[in-house]
Image: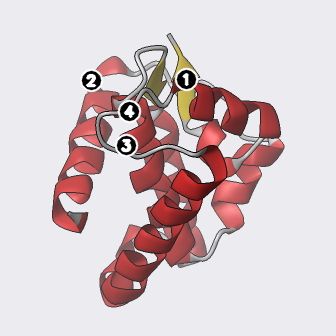
Amino acid sequence: MMIRSGALVCALALAACATGKGPARDLADPSVQRLLIMPTPAYYATLTLAAQVAQNCARYRYDAELDSLMNERRNALGHGSLSAHAQRSAITVETDVSQRSFMAKHGVTLQGADLCPAADAEILQGSALGALLVPL
């Protein structure tokens, strides 16, 4: 499951290179700043969960541009994709915990459900996950 999610994140990052639009949110946005300072396992769990939410909600897309920019910034700080490899096990555990927490919080399942109400709630709360969702 983590491999499939990682492949999705990579595909979205490649798509971002083709658009060249830049992230939807300003880097000074507090929810974006939370992404920057998150521990590596929590950060990658948030990316995976945000991609899953965007896949199951027709009103939002995953902000691959922000993902790419955050990865560059986090690498410069020493806690981006370059440090993630050594923390794969922790990322897998954190992803599972984050998914279960999200499902309990919003009363949803991640597969086959309309996650738009949950996405709306995350954006209204100003969460780091919400920062990665862009309204269409």
In the displayed structure, 83 sits above or below 106; it is below
In the displayed structure, 44 sits above or below 82; it is above
Residue 24 point in image, percent of width and height = 60, 24
Location of mark 1 (residue)? 134
Give the CA distance from mark 3 to mark 4.
Answer: 11 Å
Upstream in sequence: badge 3 or badge 4: 3
* Residue shown at the point (58%, 63%) measured from the top left: 101
The secondary structure type at the circle numbered 2 is helix
Residue 126 quadrant: top right
In the rendered view of the protein, which quadrant contains the N terminus? bottom left
Give the CA distance from mark 1 to mark 3.
Answer: 13 Å
Residue 68 as seen in the image, left or right of residue 14: right
The secondary structure type at the circle numbered 1 is strand
- Say which of marks 1 and 3 sits in front: 3
Residue 93 point in image, percent of width and height = 41, 81
Amino acid type assigned to the residue bearing label 2 in the image: Ala
Location of mark 4 (residue)? 113
Amino acid type assigned to the residue bearing label 3 in the image: Gln
Give the CA distance from mark 4 to mark 2.
Answer: 30 Å
Location of mark 2 (residue)? 18
